[in-house]
Amino acid sequence: MQKMKDKMSELKSEDFKKALEEMKFSMEDFNEKLEQTLKMLEELKKNQSLEKMIGLTKEMKEMQESLLEQSDNNDGGQELAKQQEEIQDKLNELQKEMDKLSDMLSSPSDKPIKDELNKLENQVDMQQMSETMQSVSEQMKKDKAGNTKGSQQ
């Protein structure tokens, strides 16, 4: 009878060890799948950031073209100044998005993308462009104010 209890105990212990081993492999597999999912989500986030930057750039280009067309037609300076300020806001948003993306590009495989982003930032001096837009906007407001005073006299 004791031998039977010992055998039962051994079987239970072996089954338990086997179950633990299988659970360990399952957990490792699960952990691996989670890591893959996390990497995919990070890539998706980077892609979304890139798409947002592209969209902002296109929007800024369209706004700038419209602004140039209106300034050629000598449309209201105040309205042009307002549109210039909107473009300025988009430029600031683009700069923030570029900074955010740059922070996300931390893995060695992202180095070529990060290098291109840095090159783009250097080519398009955001600070200088921002200051120029601010100056143009202020000049448009002054011109409008001067035209208003001149027409009132």
Image: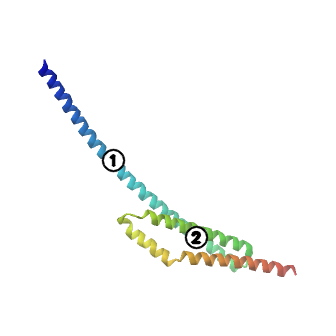
Q: Earlier in the sequence, mark 1 or mark 2?
A: 1
- Tell me where residue 84 appears, x and y as whole percent: 66, 73
Q: Dot 1 lies on which element?
A: helix
Quarter of the N terminus within the rendering:
top left
- Tell me where residue 18 appears, x and y as whole percent: 21, 36
Residue 75 appearing in the image: no
Quarter of the C terminus within the rendering:
bottom right
Residue 90 appearing in the image: yes
Q: Dot 2 lies on which element?
A: helix
Amino acid of disc 1? Asn
**Residue at the limit of the structure toward the front, as seen here:** 2
Q: Which residue is mark 2?
A: 91
Q: CA distance from mark 1 to mark 2?
A: 41 Å
Question: In the image, which is nearer the foreground, mark 1 or mark 2?
Answer: 1
- Tell me where residue 103 appears, x and y as whole percent: 45, 64
Left or right of 118 in this view: 15: left
Q: Which residue is mark 1?
A: 31
Amino acid of disc 2? Leu
Mark 1 packing: few (<14 Cα in 10 Å), some, or many (20+)? few
Instruction: Report the colour scheme.
Output: rainbow
Q: Quadrant of residue 130?
A: bottom right
Mark 2 packing: few (<14 Cα in 10 Å), some, or many (20+)? many
Residue at x 53% of width, y 77% of height: 125
- Tell me where residue 65 appears, x and y as whole percent: 62, 75
Q: Nearer the viewer, residue 153 or 35?
A: 35
Q: Quadrant of residue 71?
A: bottom right
Q: Nearer the viewer, residue 82 or 10?
A: 10
Left or right of 128 in this view: 44: left
Residue at x 58% of width, y 77% of height: 129
